[in-house]
Amino acid sequence: MKVDDDEFREEEKQKITPKTITSSTIPVHSVFIFLLTAVLTALVVELLSPNCTYWNWATNEFVLPESVPTYAIYGKSPNEQHLLHVAKVLQRLGYKRIALENEWDLLWAHDYPFFKMTKRLKDLTNQQIVNHVPGCGFITNKVDLSTTELNFLPKAFRLPSQREDFLNYAQRNPNALFVEKHNEHRNILIRPVKDINLKSNDTFVQEFIQKPYLVDGYKFDIGVYVIVTGIDPLRLYIYTGDVLFRYCSVKYYPFNASNIDSYVVGDDYLPTWEVPSLVKYYEHLEGNMRDSFDAYVRDQNLDPSIIWLQVEGIIRETVLAKEQQIAHILRSYKNLKFFELMRFDLIIDEDLRVYLMEANMSPNLSSVHFKPNALLYEQILYSAFSLVGVSSPVRGTLGERSHDVQEMITSAKNVATNLNACTKNDCNRFCNNDYCNLCLSCITGSEYEILKRTHREHLHRASMKRVFPKPILNPENFDIEAEVQNMTKRNAWLTRWFYYKCLYDNSWCY
């Protein structure tokens, strides 16, 4: 029995042993295959990495890595909640935020940066761009703008220097009411003339528009977003996707000067979606703020287009009135890669006459208080970035786009115009004729760059509409000589360029 048991154990041991050895030993060739696969995988991943060069089989050359475009923020406030949508849009466009001290592609400055960063901003590289224009304070400064002699600005007086002018005006207009405003546009209040501090250096006075147009009894203002992309020659656009409407939180009548919430739009204003007559357009029919307002005006048997023609004219005339002052400041800057996004605030009286109240540098783009405004702000930013080239269908930073890539978007053939006049006046040989100043053989390098930028802006303007050079509504009957008669030389030059482009292709007319 014992022998049989020993034989059985030996037989079972032989059955078990090979299995145990097989399960614990890995053949050498399997190890080799595993290691080879790991090495090849790592090599492929490395070659496909965006941070490395790779071989382009089509061109038979190594391709350098594509840099990520970058932006930096300049602002005095440590709280950046008001910049949330700026950061979101830039992130979606592929931008990465870096420190202000580094070499950024875009500087987004909430505060005016030209005092603290003068040296850097006077020496920008070709790939850098800044969201403010030096000297645009001539437009956005409350006192400077309000006291400019323009017929769509309510009459205003700077104190104390214009004290006598104010008193004389008030005497000639005994029914006029006046608002005393702080120079920073705070503490707005209607006051009797006798109660106004005429010796103050911190305030100015402005005539009050007494009969505003009302919606459901509420006074309101409208905020139109404006972008300047060039000065001398001026290139000026407005955002047409929507307009910011802000309604006073208290009804205007019965009028009480001590109740400022009935005539001054505050932080807690009434939004469009809470104005009863506008809800059906805005909420039920998905209209935007401007569409909803226009529909209401039509329901009152009035024509809203009267308003918007005035708005465009007001914006155009205001910026033109300040352009030469801004141009003077810009002369000390080498590379004019600046743009300015502003908001013009306007009011409308009961006769649909439009008045300009102020222009805001770094307008509010935060939806913290009113969440539905997020879409408006992000669409404004997208259109603005598209217009100025921050957002581009071509990958890479502004400075990395090769000559071939730039030519693909805009070449000499795209900006050449008025060819008949160029040949008739022999502009290939002589440039001393006024007819030759748009011929490519006669323009300077800086003029050529202006035309290329202008062409790119036209291609990529998204929801931005050009308001200067002025749209040409009827090119067949458009008198170009009369149009440019009172313009500066460079504004006339660019206006003529648009006119000739318009004659060839009517998409350039507006």
Image: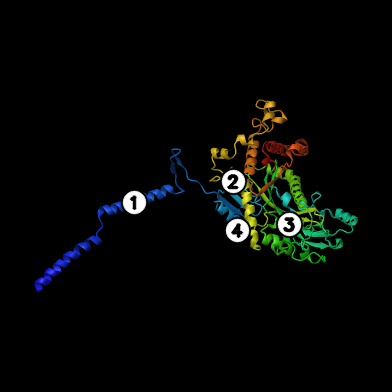
- What kind of residue is marked 3? Ala
Q: Nearer the viewer, mark 4 or mark 2?
A: 4
- What kind of residue is marked 4? Leu
Considering only vertical position in the picture, is 135 above or below 204? above
Mark 2: few/some/many CA within 10 Å (<14, 14-19, 20+): many
First in sequence: mark 2 vs mark 1? 1
**Mark 3 and mark 4 in contact (Cβ < 8 Å)?**
no
Mark 4: few/some/many CA within 10 Å (<14, 14-19, 20+): some
First in sequence: mark 1 vs mark 3? 1
Q: Kindly identify which residue carries mark 2.
A: 128
| Relative to 305, 131 lies left or right | left
| SS at mark 1 in the image | helix
Mark 1: few/some/many CA within 10 Å (<14, 14-19, 20+): few
| Relative to 118, 196 lies left or right | right
Residue 496 location, quadrant: top right
- What kind of residue is marked 1? Thr
Q: Residue at x 86, y 60 (%)?
A: 193
Q: Nearer the viewer, mark 2 or mark 1?
A: 1
First in sequence: mark 4 vs mark 2? 4
Q: Position of residue 363 (x, y in %)?
A: 68, 55
| Relative to 74, 309 lies left or right | right
| SS at mark 2 in the image | loop
Q: Kindly identify which residue carries mark 1.
A: 37
Q: Kindly identify which residue carries mark 3.
A: 295
